[in-house]
Image: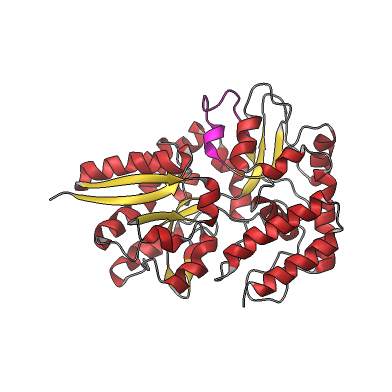
Amino acid sequence: MSLTLRGMTWSHPRGYDPLVACSSLWHARCGVTIEWEQRSLQDFESYPVEDLARRYDLIVIDHPHIGQVVRENCLLALNRPDRIRDIVKLASQSAGESFASYRMLGDQWALPIDAATQVQAWRPDRLAKPPRNWDGVMGLAKQRQVLLPMRPPHSLMVLYTLTANLGQPCASTGEDELNNAEFGGMVLDRLAGLMGHLDPACYSMDPIAVFERMSQTESQEVCAPLIYGYVSYARDGFRPARLAFGDMPAAGKQGPVGSALGGTGIAVSAYTAAPEAAFDFAFWIANGEVQRGPYATAGGQPGNAVAWQDAAVNAAAHGFYRDTWNTLDGAWVRPRHDGYMPFQQAAAERLNAGLRGGERGEAIMHDLNRLFAASFR
């Protein structure tokens, strides 16, 4: 009797196409059918995992949900005794902190299949070299050539990246404040200075919206200095104009470190009627050979370092992986406690309201600290 599993991922060719392609290979290999559905990027960043777990066998998630997942007990821990050898191998092949970001209280709740962090994107046909530092970014911004995704929660990701790159990262555990109000306020004032030169539409744009606008032939904007990398736009023919990707421009003196880690992992529902079949597929699609093979070929952005370091994978994407590796390898992991997800949305909305209203950065930061402390109660 044939078996059919249901899976949920996010709505973009990078998030959907490789899962469908790999599932087709898996069916040919094992006879198991996996039917994938999609949800929007906004839903992906905020929709309760428990609700999805009751409807799907396999779920693609991002790591800030882990604290909530552990409390709700809606996913199966993947580090069972019979899988330890595979777990150790995948941990050794992690792209940056991608693997560790799905671990909490000694258990592994998802396996990274996609790795991303805030890097830099630009139009190589219009900009010979991207800015290497914040002064260069400001120079382009004053010429109205910069876009920055600021739709919540991405505005908060920009704050995270800048504070960490400047040497004082935001808290990721149970501290009383997200960051020092004076320091965080200085960073927000600096961000406000940049936003004063950008199209206000940025406040309603996520990374996909920015890429779609930049990749149109007639686009006036040629640079997105802090944006989650999307390999799809680095490929020839994906959109009218190809985008190039590289390390983030440094705001401080430490180089491209501190970028807010993103990416996705594949998890198994605690409510699945076929846990063994779901485990088998999850471990298979996360392994290095599949990641650098059919997963990458189908337009995926692998979460396994074996793929990021593969010459053929890089060649197909004009060096996307090689040129952003240092930023990914030095990325910072967001808070993941139960209560973080509502904070992330509320903090980003408060940040945007403050920037748009011309408030002092320190006043905004005081409110972010208050929201952060409340998220632990």
Image quarter where the C terminus lies is: bottom right
In the rendered image, residue 280, in percent from the top left (x then y), is placed at: 28, 56
Residue positioned most to the left: 1
Name above or below for residue 257 compared with residue 41. Answer: below
**Residue at x-position 62% and y-position 42%:** 207
Let me know if residue 22 is in the magenta part: no
Can residue 148 be seen from the camera position used here? no
In the rendered image, residue 209, in percent from the top left (x then y), is placed at: 62, 37
Query: Which quadrant of the structure image shows residue 142?
Result: top right
Query: Which quadrant of the structure image shows residue 198?
Result: top right
Query: Which quadrant of the structure image shows residue 223?
Result: top right
User: Main SS of the magenta segment?
Assistant: loop
Magenta residue span: 230-244
Question: 314 and 180: which one is in front?
Answer: 180
**Residue at x-position 74% and y-position 65%:** 368
**Residue at x-position 52% and y-position 30%:** 235
Question: 264 and 149: which one is in front?
Answer: 149
In the rendered image, residue 38, in percent from the top left (x then y), is placed at: 43, 45
Q: As drawn, is 71 to the left or to the right of 361?
A: left
Q: As drawn, is 101 to the left or to the right of 74?
A: right
Q: As drawn, is 45 to the left or to the right of 255?
A: left
